[in-house]
Image (cartoon, rainbow, N blue to C red):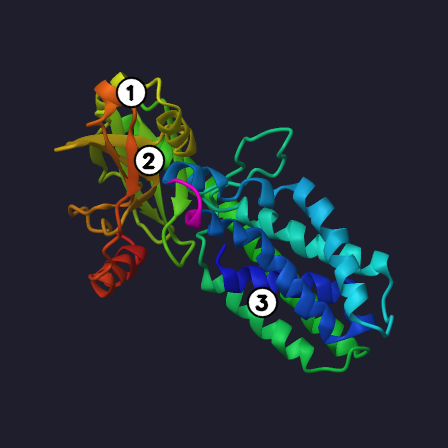
Amino acid sequence: MDSVTQIVLGAAVSEAAIGKKVGNKAALWGAIAGTIPDLDVLGKFFLGMVDNLALHRSFSHSITFSLFAAPILAWLITKIYKKKEATFFDWTWAMFLSFFTHPLLDSFTTWGTMLFWPFSEYRIAIKSIFVVDPLYTLPFMVLLIWALTKKRDSVNRQKLNNWGIIISTTYLLFTLFNKLYVDTKFEKSFENLEQKVTRFDSRPTPLNNILWTANAETENGFYMGYYSLLDSKPPSDYKYVAKNQNLVLPYQTNTDLNKLIEITNGFYTANKTPTGFQLNDLRFGEIRNFENDSSAFVFIYNVDTTEWQSLKTLLFWQQPNNFKDGKKSLGQLINRLKGN
């Protein structure tokens, strides 16, 4: 999830744990702990593109990291404050909650988190909520801020914070039920497609949980379609995209390429370029395709193969996104969200 949401979540669970003992300091340090796992983004300054992608939401988003980081941060906090309002174990518990709820929430989004690293590098990705969802964050944030204006021993303070946690968690459960319902609609519609679907994934579109999109894999390509909870008919208007994965086959011995394909979970297509090929990550869809027009994919990775024959080397770089038509895209999103 976005940084603001993780700050709110980390602050709220820490407040729930020891806010009555230490006041607003609980929320402050909870917010800090809720931010720390995302410092993996600093990898872009010293790692190549593929390794940086692999680092994102890996060890820093694991239960193991939470277990080790919590007492370290707790020890630091107890050294900063001379007045011992809470014990080391109190702070450890609060910081663990702030650390752990971060990857737990992230696991409901599309990218996936390595919750069980180092025992497993499998990325848990439930894909029931978009990485930025105002309906999850705003009520949660308002109730937390309201709670922090009350005295630490105020019953209303605890109630307001608890209600924020309850409402946000209830909404998260609501997204799971939405996903289950939407998946049945998509699966039923696949019976009418020309090619047999072997697997599919679904996820909500930006900023909402009403309009959903799915990638359905066939032998030679993918069907991409949308379904709104407000639609009056099942999904039917699918766009077909050829895999073109034959462009990738000659380079299968390259470790970075295999790592990149693993990151996409196999939901990718390729297209030829003058210097090699592009690999399109289908998990995040296209920048603008709510009205089934042509659009670039959100995540496109360029692979330069010019040095392959001599050095057995591939060069990777991510293509920058162009959101200059953001207003148009938002308008299309809202129109499609209203139903077909």
Bin the neighbour count of mark 3 within 10 Å (Cα to Cα): few under 14, some 14-19, many 20 and up. many
> Which residue type does callout 1 highlight?
Tyr
Give me the disc on residue 215. Answer: 2
* The residue positioned farthest toward the front in the image shown: 310
Disc 2 is placed on an element classified as strand
Q: Amino acid at mark 2?
A: Asn
**CA distance separating discs 3 and 1:** 48 Å
Marks 2 and 1, the one that precedes in the sequence: 2
Across and down, in percent, residue 265 comes to 41, 30
Q: CA distance from mark 2 to mark 3?
A: 31 Å
Task: Compare marks 3 and 1 and give the one earlier in the sequence.
Answer: 3
Q: Determine which residue is flagged by label 3.
A: 140
Front-lying residue, 98 or 187: 98
Quick check: can you spot residue 18?
no
Q: Are marks 2 and 1 in contact (CB under 8 Å)?
A: no
Q: Position of residue 9 (x, y in %)?
A: 61, 61
Image: 238 above or below 310: below
Which mark, by number, is residue 251? 1
Residue 142: which disc? none
